[in-house]
């Protein structure tokens, strides 16, 4: 059995297509948020942020086969602080640059998170600092999240590294 999702990283309210190919029968989906689905192609919307373990199980009445998928759902909307709504994200082949034209009014934390949810970089952006750069030289190709936290507000930006 093979199962996949149209995206492993999404925002609250974003629709994700889950697909499976199985020779053992119909696929039952447990989305990890208390909701379920059936079929080889099922759409689902996560309404709360978090990391969800989605389990696809194919059964023919004699045997079951299951595959687990990890989906990270973030809430990056409704931000009201100047520091986070005025952020500029720039991505090059060598670095990620986060810029705040007027400088940060408070210290902020910047994190880089890979598709599995593992934090691979963390640092502090100091009050008054205008920009912060992260080298992408050692990163593998794939999808990453840049997460900035300041004054209990969070901004998350999805990015793709390709070489």
Image (cartoon, helix red, strand yellow):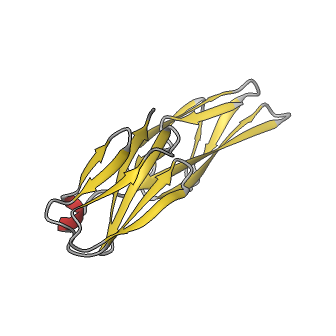
Which residue corresponds to the image point at 46% horizontal and 42% vertical from the top-left? 143
The image quarter containing residue 134 is bottom left
Give percent across and percent down for residue 23.
74, 23
Relative to residue 134, is residue 61 depicted above or below?
A: above
- 100 or 66: nearer the viewer: 100
Where residue 97 sits: x, y (%)? 30, 51
Q: Where is residue 163 shown, x and y percent of the image?
A: 45, 32
Relative side of 107 to 8, left or right: left
Q: Is residue 105 above or below residue 133?
A: below
Q: Nearer the viewer, residue 37 or 55?
A: 55
Residue appearing at x 42%, y 51% in the figure: 145
Q: Kindly give the residue lying farthest to the left in the view shown.
A: 102
**In the picture, residue 131 is in which quadrant?**
bottom left
Identify which residue, 123 or 145, lies in the foreground. 123
Task: Let me know if residue 121 appears in the view.
Answer: yes
* Residue placed most toward the observer, 109 or 135: 135
Percent x, y of residue 40: 60, 29
Give me the residue at 33% from left, 74% from top.
152
Q: Is residue 80 visible?
A: no
Q: Residue furthest right?
A: 62
Residue pictured at 70% horizontal, 26% vertical? 22
């Amino acid at each position: 059995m093979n199962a996949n999702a149209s995206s492993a990283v999404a925002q609250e309210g974003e629709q994700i297509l889950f697909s499976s190919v199985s020779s053992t029968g119909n696929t039952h989906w447990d989305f990890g948020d208390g909701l379920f689905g059936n079929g080889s192609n099922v759409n689902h919307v996560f309404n709360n942020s978090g990391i969800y373990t989605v389990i696809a199980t194919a059964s023919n009445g004699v045997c079951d086969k299951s595959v687990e998928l990890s989906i990270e759902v973030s809430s990056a909307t409704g931000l009201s602080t100047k520091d986070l709504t005025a952020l500029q994200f720039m991505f090059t082949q060598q670095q990620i640059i986060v810029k705040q034209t007027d400088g940060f009014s408070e210290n902020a934390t910047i994190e880089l998170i890979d598709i599995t949810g593992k934090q691979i970089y963390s640092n502090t952006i100091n009050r008054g600092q205008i920009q912060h750069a992260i080298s992408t030289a050692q990163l593998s190709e794939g999808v990453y999240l840049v997460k900035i936290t300041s004054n209990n507000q969070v901004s998350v930006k999805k990015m793709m590294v390709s070489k």
